[in-house]
Image: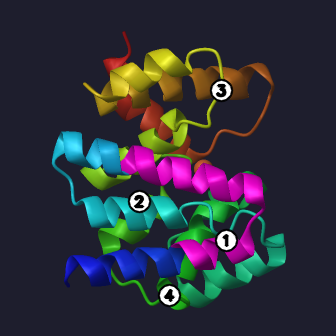
């Protein structure tokens, strides 16, 4: 595709997201897209695919839960009984399902980057890492350690994923909240990169 066509495609996806989420989430989406593009450039990933996955990563987040489950079922995306236990995890699978069944995206790299953006998984692809890290370190994020993680993101995606997984597992344990299998797998695979 020509550059112009690629840009048109990206704008179609942005417009589609804009209709389905709040103004605040839409500006988060644009911030994640910018960060994903920047990381794709640094790490030599496909910038178009990084943009598409970033634009669509939260597309299902404000859909009613039942609609999310229907999408997941219809598209037949990977969704374990284990993930069904935590409603917060549904939007990632539902987003991949929407991309696949409504937007007709067939690229597994893009679909998996949307699918795994919240929990991660063991042995992520470069695109999966980029979208997960972009979501944590985008310009609109304001938590304590964000500046530090933003800087680390430019030299090691694994180190950001490590810091995130160590933090999230500790937080979930402390608050007696549910820890999904994929979150555990991410911790087991990446916490060794924590510094
Ligand atoms: Fe999300
Ligand atoms: Fe997000």
* Rendered location of residue 10, percent (x, y): 42, 74
| Label 3 vs 4, first from the N-terminus | 4
Q: Residue at x 78, y 72 (%)?
A: 63
- Compared with residue 33, is residue 55 higher up or lower down, i.e. above or below? below
Which color scheme does this rendered protein use? rainbow
| Distance in Å between CA atoms under marks 1 and 3 | 22 Å
Kind of element beneath mark 3: loop
| Label 2 vs 1, first from the N-terminus | 1
| Distance in Å between CA atoms under marks 2 and 4 | 15 Å
Q: Residue at x 35, y 46 (%)?
A: 130
Q: Of the residues tagged 3 and 4, which is closer to the observer?
A: 3
Extent of the magenta region: 14-36
Q: Which residue is drawn at 21% across and 39% down?
A: 42
Q: Of the residues tagged 2 and 4, which is closer to the observer?
A: 4
**In which quadrant of the rendered view does residue 30 lie?**
bottom right
Q: Of the residues tagged 3 and 2, which is closer to the observer?
A: 3
- Compared with residue 175, is residue 31 higher up or lower down, i.e. above or below? below
Main SS, magenta residues: helix
Q: Mark 3 points at which residue?
A: 142
Q: Name the residue under label 2.
A: 113
The tag on residue 18 is 1
Q: Give the side of residue 108 with respect to residue 59, left or right.
A: left
* Rendered location of residue 12, percent (x, y): 50, 81
Q: Name the residue under label 4.
A: 103
């Amino acid at each position: 595709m020509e550059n112009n066509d690629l840009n048109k495609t990206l704008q179609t996806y942005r417009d589609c997201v804009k209709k389905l989420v709040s103004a605040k989430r839409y500006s988060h989406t644009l911030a994640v897209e910018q960060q994903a593009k920047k990381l794709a450039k640094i790490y030599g990933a496909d910038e178009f695919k990084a943009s598409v996955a970033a634009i669509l990563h939260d597309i299902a987040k404000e859909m009613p839960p039942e609609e999310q489950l229907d999408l997941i079922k219809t598209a037949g995306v990977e969704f374990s009984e284990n993930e069904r236990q935590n409603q917060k995890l549904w939007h990632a699978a539902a987003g991949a399902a929407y991309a696949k069944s409504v937007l007709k995206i067939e690229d597994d790299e893009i679909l998996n980057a949307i699918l795994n953006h919240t929990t991660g998984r063991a042995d992520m692809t470069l695109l999966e890492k980029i979208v997960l890290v972009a979501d944590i370190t985008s310009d609109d994020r304001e938590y304590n350690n964000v500046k530090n993680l933003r800087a680390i993101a430019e030299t090691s995606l694994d180190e950001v994923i490590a810091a995130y997984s160590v933090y999230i597992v500790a937080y979930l344990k402390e608050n007696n909240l549910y820890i999904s299998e994929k979150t555990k797998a991410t911790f087991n695979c990446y916490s060794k990169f924590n510094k």
